[in-house]
Amino acid sequence: MASIFTKIINREIPGYIIAEDDRFIAFLDVMPLVEGHTLIVPKKEIDYIFDLDDTMLAEMMVFAKTVAIAIKKAIPCKRIGVAVIGLEVPHTHVHLVPMNTMVDINFTKPKLSVAPERMKTLSEKIRNEVGK
């Protein structure tokens, strides 16, 4: 059965897509820690990040860097935190989280509920900064 991320990749369910190429996609987390919380996902469904071959892992991190730079330009923050948890969805993904304090990347805190219109605005704002 396809993961929820594969369903977003295949456009079977909607997602707030920020960037994509032939191997990776970035989209807003619908249960974010903070506004702008983005997921980087390989289009090939592989459960565990360290099962990616070295080339794919390196390319995913370079893709993530491009997206992180765009997030930082679009969302006021001091840094973009990076986390790999990998237990919630059996499909490799990297969390990019805008941070002003360490609490911003605390995965035990309650997730935000962000209105769809705000998510759309955030995704457009970040997408407009990709590659600039």
Image (cartoon, grey):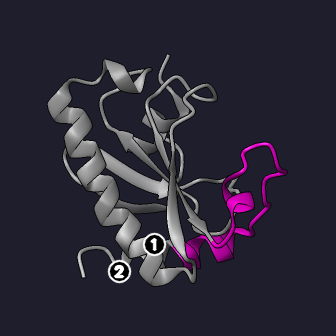
Question: Cα distance, mark 2 to mark 1?
Answer: 8 Å
Residue occupying image coordinates x 75% and y 59%: 103
Residue occupying image coordinates x 61% and y 25%: 87
Image: magenta residue range: 100-122
Q: Nearer the viewer, residue 42 or 84?
A: 84
Specify the amino acid type for callout 1.
Ile
- Tell me, yes or no, if residue 23 can be seen here: no
Q: What is the crowding at mark 1: few (fewer than 14 residues within 10 Å), some, or many (at least 20)?
A: many
In the image, 8: left or right of 119? left
Question: Are the residues tagged 2 and 1 within 8 Å (C-beta)?
Answer: yes
Count up the numbered dots. Answer: 2
How far from the left and from the top, in percent, is residue 102?
A: 69, 60
Q: Nearer the viewer, residue 29 or 96?
A: 96
Residue occupying image coordinates x 23% and y 75%: 131
**Residue named by callout 2:** 129
Callout 1: helix, strand or loop? Answer: helix
Q: Is residue 110 magenta?
A: yes
- Tell me, yes or no, if residue 131 can be seen here: yes
Q: Nearer the viewer, residue 38 or 114?
A: 38
